[in-house]
Image: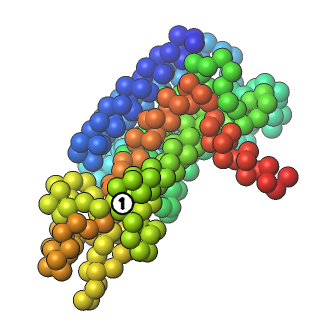
Amino acid sequence: MEMLDLLRFILGSAMLCYGSWTDLKTRRVPNEVWLISGSIASAILIYDLSTQDWGYHVWALLFATIILFYNAFVDEYVLEDNQTMLWRVFQILAILSALYFLLTVDSEEISKENNYKLIDILSISVLMILMYVWYYFGPTIGGADVKAIMTIGLVAPFTISINEDPMMAFETRGFPYPFVVFMNSLLLYLLIPIGLALYNLVSGNIEKPYFQIFFGTKMSIKSARESFVWPMQQVVGDKAIMVAFVKHKSDSESEWDKLEEKGITNPWITFKIPYIIPLTLAFFVSAFFGDLFSTYLVEPINSIFT
């Protein structure tokens, strides 16, 4: 492993392990974790690119990408007038820089054989944009999780491999590395329902309508009140029903009270599992093994239709 790759691996490991620990303990991750890591990673990336011959359009793309990253943390409502004006100037420059890249980049430069590094640089901003879209319009995801994924784009923009022969989606080149980490985290997250189902089978927690064994388990209300969990059983009218989708902003305390009034002291619950935990595991899995998502999920599905 080269020195810069090792530095990036250490930075990413420290960032994600600390973020997982704080998220697990408090369900909060200080913004400083991502800001400091992203700033250090940006400096490393700037140094890395400065040792090579890149055109102005690539530097413009990098500038736009870094501003896009900081945009997730800068709150214009707490900035003073002069600071707000300066930040807006940076935003406008970032937009112009992105346009400059799009208008000046040669399609042959991107498609050029073995010129994967430019694709990697471009994929950082693509991943960040996807995270913005996912946060505002997609499934429920925490702000810390989105910021963690965006930071990974800067921390590990290029392939980090401890294995000499990592798994890849294609023969000569896999997906951009930040996407590999992200997709592997999705695969690991999918293992949680399987693990819960096995636990419930062993514990004898088998009740109709059965679907809940994949998403939670049974816990005493006393323990539930002191844990980071949501109630899967809720009182509606005069009946306690099982809900398929828990509203994450619901008042859990009142739900526990209603269940106790119904005499249900050991209800079904679902855990508030921080997404950053499978993301952290995916960071290590990607470095040691490669693209598990494509190898064990995409390729088998693709083989069915080919």
Horizontally, residue 253 falls left or right of residue 170, namely left
Count all numbered tags in the image, as a single digit.
1
Is 110 or 253 nearer to us in this picture? 253
Q: Which residue is located at x 15 percent, y 74 percent?
A: 260
Q: Which residue is located at x 22 percent, y 66 percent?
A: 266
Any part of residue 87 in sight: no
Is 35 or 183 nearer to us in this picture? 183
Scheme by which the image is coloured = rainbow
Under mark 1, the amino acid is: Gly
Can you give x and y, in whole percent of width and height, for residue 267 in the image?
A: 26, 68
- Look at the picture and state if 73 lies above or below 155: below
Horizontally, residue 29 falls left or right of residue 98, namely left
Any part of residue 273 in sight: yes
Can you give x and y, in whole percent of width and height, for residue 62 in the image?
A: 57, 32
Q: Which residue is located at x 51 percent, y 56 percent?
A: 134
Can you give x and y, in whole percent of width and height, for residue 291 in the image?
A: 63, 35
- Look at the picture and state if 232 lies above or below 52: below
Can you give x and y, in whole percent of width and height, for residue 12 in the image?
A: 44, 27
Q: Which residue is located at x 27 percent, y 48 percent?
A: 27
The extreme bottom residue here reads 238
Which of the 4 image quarters holds residue 293?
top right
Locate the N terminus by quadrant. top right
Category of crowding for the residue at label 1, using alpha-carbon neighbours closer than 10 angstroms: few (below 14), some (14–19), many (at least 20): few
Is 234 or 104 nearer to us in this picture? 234
- Look at the picture and state if 255 lies above or below 171: below
Disc 1 is placed on an element classified as: loop
The residue at which mark 1 appears reads as 204
Is 94 or 62 nearer to us in this picture? 62
